[in-house]
């Protein structure tokens, strides 16, 4: 490990090493206007399969300026989970495979339909569960629990809405950035962000119900009515109009 390795030095080493087939920059420096004086550079050094190079020793290098992951093309292609959003907005610095590295990165930004549908159903149920618990706890006077459940519901909601658009949820740091450039279909970004911020900050029940009404319409239109209908009469407690005393 080279604790004082700079980004410029890494670029120089990568440029002169034929084992390297790709260099990908993610994080703040890949999001226009998001880098600060404290932002390091997060990079993937992508090696050809079976390559023998001293750059492999840089894997896991971490400093105030630079974080390095060294991987092979196949390993890079299989990255998922928490890394998916970061890679979906990454910048291709080097691509020596005639666009293959860029294609891998582009694919990270779009879930296939079956995957997205299954993910959305799960996140919808999780969102409804936290919302229901929040509203029920507020009704019963357990205000701390109600507030905590409301705040937790927002994370599930964001996962749901991005899954409905076949995208990965951005890290909270990049939520404003993402929606300013790539709005969620059917949602007006400013009022939406204001509403979820107020819910997370206050646990306001009326706001939660108002937002749920919008989410329910979107979810049903996307074919997720069965997930909602499984909640039965409990839906009444989540909706803005409460026509009778819920359980």
Image (spheres, helix red, strand yellow):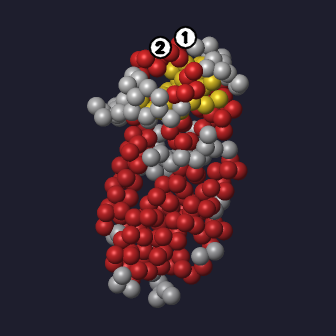
Residue that protrudes farthest toward the top in the picture: 16
Q: Quadrant of residue 27?
A: top left
| Residue 40 horizontal side relative to residue 70, left or right | left
| Residue 226 horizontal side relative to residue 185, left or right | right
| Residue ID at (61%, 20%) | 53
Q: Nearer the viewer, residue 190 or 111?
A: 111
Q: Position of residue 112 (x, y in %)?
A: 68, 44
Residue 99 appears in view: no
| Residue ID at (38%, 58%) | 196
Q: Secondary structure at mark 2?
A: helix
What residue would you read off at disc 2?
A: 12
| Residue 58 horizontal side relative to residue 166, left or right | left
Give the spatial CA distance, label 2 vs label 1. 7 Å
Residue that protrudes farthest toward the left in the picture: 37
Compared to residue 97, the image places residue 166 above or below, namely: below
Compared to residue 153, the image places residue 3 above or below, namely: above
Residue 155 appears in view: yes
Pointer 2 with pointer 1, Cβ within 8 A: yes
What residue would you read off at disc 1?
A: 16
Q: Secondary structure at mark 1?
A: loop
| Residue ID at (47%, 13%) | 12
Q: Quadrant of residue 173?
A: top left
Q: Nearer the viewer, residue 186 or 179?
A: 179
Compared to residue 97, the image places residue 128 above or below, namely: below
| Residue ID at (38%, 25%) | 4
Q: Position of residue 180 (x, y in %)?
A: 40, 40
Count of all numbered marks drawn on residues in the image: 2
Badge 2 density bin: few <14, some 14–19, many ≥20, Cα 10 Å: few
């Amino acid at each position: 490990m080279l604790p004082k390795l700079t980004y410029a030095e890494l670029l120089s080493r990568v440029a002169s090493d034929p084992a390297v087939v790709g260099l990908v920059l993610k994080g703040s420096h890949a999001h226009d206007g998001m880098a600060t004086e404290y932002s390091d550079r997060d990079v993937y050094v992508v090696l050809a399969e079976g390559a023998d190079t001293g750059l492999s020793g840089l894997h896991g290098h971490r400093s105030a300026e630079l974080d390095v992951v060294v991987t092979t093309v196949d390993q890079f292609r299989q990255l998922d989970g928490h890394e998916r959003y970061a890679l979906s907005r990454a910048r291709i610095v080097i691509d020596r495979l005639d666009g293959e590295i860029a294609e891998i990165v582009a694919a990270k930004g779009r879930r296939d339909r079956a995957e997205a549908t299954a993910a959305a159903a799960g996140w919808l149920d999780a969102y409804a569960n936290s919302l229901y618990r929040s509203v029920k706890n507020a009704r019963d006077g357990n205000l701390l629990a109600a507030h905590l459940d409301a705040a937790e519901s927002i994370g599930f909601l964001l996962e749901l809405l991005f899954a409905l658009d076949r995208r990965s949820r951005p890290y909270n740091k990049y939520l404003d950035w993402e929606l300013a450039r790539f709005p969620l279909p059917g949602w007006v970004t400013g009022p939406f962000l204001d509403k979820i911020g107020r819910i997370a900050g206050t646990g306001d029940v009326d706001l939660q119900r108002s937002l749920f009404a919008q989410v329910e319409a979107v979810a049903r239109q996307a074919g997720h009515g069965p997930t909602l209908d499984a909640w039965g009469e409990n839906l009444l407690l989540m909706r803005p109009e409460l026509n009778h005393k819920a359980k």
